[in-house]
Image: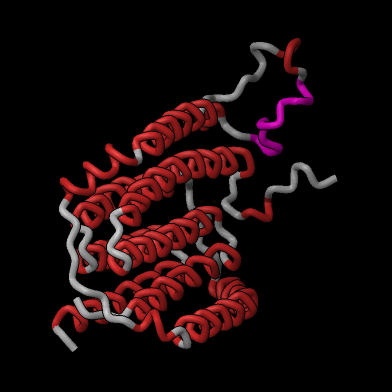
Amino acid sequence: MTLYAVLFYALAAVTLFCTLVAVTRRVLVHAVVWMVGSLLGTALIFLLLGAPLLAGFEVIIYAGAIMVLFLFAIMLMAQEPNEPPEVRTMVRRRLRARMFWPAVWGLAGIMACMALISFDPTNAAPLAAGRVSPKALGAWVFGNAWPAVEAVSLLLFAALAGARYLGLPLVRSDRPEKMGESLDLDQPPCAVTPEDER
Amino acid sequence: MIVPLNHILLFAAALFFIGLVALVARRNLIMILLGVEVMLNAAGVVFVAAALRWWDIAGQGMVLFIMGVAAAEIAVGLTLVFRVWRRTRSLNPDSLKALKD
C-alpha cells in the first residue's frame, strides 16, 4: 500500500464522517460547517485523483460560494425557539423512528453496490497515477464541449433571473382588480408584519 | 496513486446514500437541499475516478458542468425555501399543504 493509498483511505474516512455528522445535526449552522469539512475532504480526494482544477473549484464554488449562500439563507430565516427538554427528547425519539427505514434501505443499497462492484474482476485493476493540468482541461472544455458551456451559462442566467423573480416582494393591494384578493397565494394566513416583505 | 476503482466507487456510493438518507428522512427544507448537494458531490467523485480509470478527460469536464448545475439549483432552491418560509414561517415541508383540498 503506497502513501497515496493511505492518504486516500484517510481522506475518504474523514469525508464520510463529516458528511454523516453534517446530515444528522439539528442546528443548521453546525450542519453547514460540518458540510464544509466534507467538501474540503472531497477536494483533496480530487487532487489525489489527478484533478487539481476541480479541487480548486470544489473549494471555491462548493465550500466557498454555496455554503456561504446556505449560511446567509439560514441567517435570513429565524430559527424556531428552543423547545423544552421533554419535547426535545420526544422529537428525537420520533426522528429516530423516522430515520430507521431510510437507514435500512441505505445500508441495503450500499451492500448491493458492494456486491455488484466487487464481483467484477475487470474493475479490480489499480488506478495508475495521472494528472490533468488545468490548461488541458480548459482546452478540452472550450474546444470540445463549448455547446455545453453555453448551455450552462444560459442555465446560470436563467437561475439568476428566476431567483430574482422569486425573491421579489409580492404583488398585493396595488393591483387588486387584476389579481383578485383570493388569488393572492402568498398572503400569509397569519399576521405578518410588513417589515418582512422588504 | 494505487487505489482500486472499486474502493473509490464504494466511497462514492456511501456518500450518495448518506445524501439520499438526508433527502428522504430530514424534515427540514435546508437539510433536504444539503442532501442533494451531497449526492451531486458523490456523482462528481465517480466522474473523476472514471476519468482516471479510462484515461479520458471528458469525465473531469463533466464535473465542471455538475458544479454549474449545482450552483444554479442551489440558487433557485434556496430562494424557493425562503419564499416558503416567508409564507408559512416554517422550514418543515409538511407545512406545505396549500394544494391539499
Q: Quadrant of residue A101?
A: bottom right
The relative height of residue A165 versus residue A27 in the rendered view (above or below) is above
Q: Quadrant of residue B41?
A: bottom left
Please indicate whether residue B55 sits to the left or right of residue B70 in the image: left
Residue A169 appears at what percent x and percent y? 54, 25
Looking at this view, is A27 or A1 the one in front?
A1
Please indicate whether residue A192 sits to the left or right of residue A58 in the image: right
* Residue at image coords 32%, 41%: A144
Quadrant of the image for the N terminus of chain A?
Answer: bottom left
Q: Which residues are magenta?
A: A181-191
* Residue at image coords 56%, 65%: B26
Applied colour scheme = secondary structure
Residue A111 appears at what percent x and percent y? 52, 85
Residue A88 painted magenta: no
Residue A184 painted magenta: yes
* Residue at image coords 27%, 80%: A126
Looking at this view, is B26 or A43 the one in front?
A43
Q: Quadrant of residue A150?
A: top left
